[in-house]
Amino acid sequence: MVELYQHPSTPSSLEQNQQRLQSVESLIQAGDGNSAKQGADAINPAELSPEQHTQLRLLYAQIQLSFGEAEQAIESLAQIQPQQLNRDNQVKYFQSQAFAYSLTGNLLDSAKSRIELHPLITSPAELEKNQASILETLRLLPDTALQTNQTDVLAGWMSLTIILKNINQPDFDTQISQWRATFPTHPADLSFLDRPQDSPKNAPQAKAIALLLPGSGTFAQAGKAIRAGFMAAYNHADNATKPTLRFYDSEQSSPQTLYTQAVAEGVQLIIGPLAKEQIQSLADTVTFNIPVLALNHIPGLQKNRLYQFSLSPLDDTDQITHKAWEDGHQRALMLVPENAPGKRIANYLTEDWQDQGGTVLETQTYNPKETDFSAPIQKLLNLDESEQRYNKILALIPGVKYTPRRRQDADAILLSAYSAEARSINPQLQFYQAGDLPVYAMPTVYTGQVNASLDTDLNKITFCDTPWLFNKAYQGELNMDALKETWKQFPSAYLRLIAMGIDAYNLATRLDNLETDAYPGATGNLSLTADQRIKRQLICAKFMDGQPEISGFSTENTGAMPEPKTPINHAVY
């Protein structure tokens, strides 16, 4: 963005640009990030006043957040001095900063931003909501991170959070009295403790939840895995009043019939169904009187009170192309399976890579039923053309020596493959002189369980995946170690669905706030898009010595599990 103001701004140009800025802001509020960016790009910073220039930076940060580009938004916000903004824009600044930090998993800084926001809010309802967000964000931190000897405002919030975590302790009232004495001028409003319905002990939630999951048929095992994760979260919850659960086999009746039955039985939230055709049928035939958290995603489908949560390849391809681009690559080769899912993934990867500014030089497909992938790899690397050139030269000059040479214009490979296929593909890439080309793969490359002896063949492959698969990356107490007895009942292909079930339960009380308060879930850092899709921000890792080492959150998993012959953990895409 231009920092120098070469042309003096006239009152008329300042007024016109203020209207343009307001128009961009309206587009952001309407959820139209693309149009907002086009409008912001059309504004010449050199014609803006210093105040307008700062406002434009703030708008850019909000636009970046609408695209899920939290790191870029944080950088944009860092160039703004909030005290130079008017009160309304200061509110937007700290709201944006809190959201950006929560998206990147920086919970403490997110809470700090909300604490800065608190004295700027005038609405009692918004104050109550912001206070709840502060306490909820801090509650997700371990107690050791909340311990402090300070007596400032942040220390007060942290100390209060520890007390509220143990609300059922017999000395709770004594601890609250001591807290009041230690922080007599603290801005926290404790009047909610006198309203049982609003206390953390009885957090607002549906009194009855219905789960529409397949209990029979092709996806019965998938439904069982989701239910196992859901019940683990349900049983672990410390709420004094848990919701009543009702289970419906989505294969035994139409989704419309089950929806009507659930509503008639007093359900206030429906989770499911899983199959896309059932979600579409439900959306086509029902006016939603209660919220529905569908466990899949249909692009383009949007309806009031319908939320879509899935292990969507949209998130997978978005994350891995962002990672490859951030690592400095621009020209990619693509290798995908020769089937319908492979074609779909290729389209997503191509679109996301081009959106980054990258170029896909060539795409090749392989037969996943084979183990020899030399033919498509040689085509991808243009080694077949090198062979053809050699044959022509050999015809002219018999006995000439030949050393095949791969193409030199690519700087990365985008790969879609299951682990069994990738264990053959990666060594063959090295054999055909592509060992120096970094490989960025879809999460299917990882079984979800460390197996160093087998996965040595995956070394140097980078992938982005579900945080729950890496205990130190997932901050919840229901990590893989804690639920080992649960997931041992399932093939590794279903591990991500167990994590999905954990999040499905925890999302039940967070749907209303997810647009502004990202939730660090088991399947990713979760936020809500303008079309009511729950977007996942994943964790990226690279195989080293047969084990995934996580970028920025380096950790290792433990345990091993036999890999199923036909992985289907992404079958519900």
Image (tube, grey):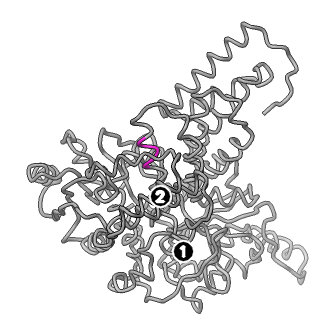
Q: Nearer the viewer, mark 2 or mark 1?
A: 2
Quadrant of res 49: top right
Q: Where is residue 479 drawn, in percent x and y?
A: 45, 76
**For residue 202, which quarter of the picture?**
bottom left
Residue at image mark 2: 179
Mark 2: amino acid: Trp
The secondary element bearing badge 2 is classed as: helix
* Membership of 145 in magenta stretch: no
Q: Nearer the viewer, residue 87 or 41?
A: 87
Q: Residue at x 41, y 34 (%)?
A: 124
Mark 2–mark 1 Cα distance, whole angstroms, equals 50 Å
What's drawn in magenta, residue-wise? 128-132
Count of numbered circles in the view: 2
Vertical relation: 530 (above or below) 46: below
Give the mark, 2 or 1, whose residue is nearer the N terminus.
2
Disc 2 vs disc 1: Cβ atoms closer than 8 Å? Answer: no
Work out whether residue 446 can be spotted: yes
User: Which image quarter holds the N terminus?
Assistant: top right
Closest to the observer, 317 or 111: 111
> With 146 as the anchor, is 132 left or right in this view?
left
| Three-letter residue code for mark 1 | Val
Q: Is residue 415 above or below residue 299?
A: below
Q: Which class describes the residues within 10 Å of circle 1: few (<14), some (14-19), or many (20+)? A: many
Q: Main secondary structure of the magenta part?
A: helix
Q: Is residue 571 visible?
A: no
Residue 394 in the image: x percent, y percent?
85, 76
Quarter of the image with the C terminus in it: bottom left
Mark identifier at residue 454: none
Q: Which mark is residue 445?
A: 1
Q: Nearer the viewer, residue 474 or 217?
A: 474
